[in-house]
Image (tube, rainbow, N blue to C red):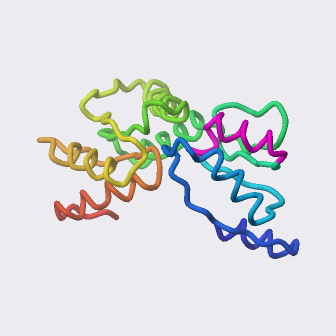
Amino acid sequence: QGAARQCCDEHGMRLLFHPCDHRDPHLPAALVRLAADLRLEGMVLVPPVSLDDKVITALSAAEMPVCLLAPARAPRNGCAVLLDDEEASRTLTSHVLDLGHRRIGFVCGHPDHESSRARLAGFRRALRERGMAEERSLVVAGDFSFASGRSAGAALLDQRVRPTAIIASNDDMAAGVMAAAHDRSVGIP
């Protein structure tokens, strides 16, 4: 948020943050109304809203310029900031392995998101590159929420032999894992 706000300030623009419930079936129409009511010049959509084709179609029909952050695929027209989720996860896992960890927990993201599959694939690829087998008990489900991270962290930390490191597929789940560690008086360096 800070860098985006600073960039807008430097160009004489205002940046407004608006929370959205991506499960709301009326979200596409609500965003079109918001854009018209506030006379917005454009919108930046973040996941999971940037993955919602109905939202993107509605804003496009309203001729509202959008920039999509981490969409599942590049848009035909418009702008997007694409991430290589698999490579990022592979790099992160390799770093954790370089630190000496061999029993690494992994908290998966929402099963409907392509980024979740890509991040898990990167984790698995890093293990294979080091000749390591994946321990299925160390890969647990999440859904990108704090609560799912806390639950996944509890499942990992309550194992007889705990992982020495845990990788979560997003920051909210990482915070949940940290809360689970705190609940168990497990220190985090």
Instruction: Point out residue 147 in the picture as x, y percentages from the top left corner.
Output: 31, 52
- Is 171 above or below relative to 39? above
Residue occupying the point 53% across, 41% down: 25
Q: Which residues are magenta?
A: 47-63
The quadrant of the rendering that contains the N terminus is: bottom right
Q: Is residue 56 magenta?
A: yes
Q: Quadrant of residue 8?
A: bottom right
In the rendered image, residue 115, in percent from the top left (x then y), is placed at 54, 35
Toward the viewer: 102 or 89? Answer: 89
Q: Nearer the viewer, residue 76 or 138?
A: 76
- At x 33%, y 41%, the residue is 104
Residue 33: x percent and y percent?
70, 55
Quarter of the image for residue 13 reads bottom right
Residue at 30 percent across and 36 percent down: it is 140
Q: Which residue corresponds to the image point at 11% horizontal and 41% vertical from the top-left?
A: 160
Is the C terminus in the top left, top right, bottom left or bottom right quadrant?
A: bottom left
The answer to whether residue 16 is left or right of residue 9 is left
Is residue 178 shown in magenta? no
Residue 116 to residue 43: above or below: above
State which quadrant residue 6 falls in.
bottom right
Q: Is residue 111 left or right of residue 1?
A: left
Magenta residues, dominant SS class: helix
167 relative to 78 in the view: left or right: left
Task: Please say if 159 is above or below 44.
Answer: above
Left or right of 163 in this view: 107: right
Residue toward you, 94 or 33: 33
Locate residue 81, reporting x and y percent: 73, 45
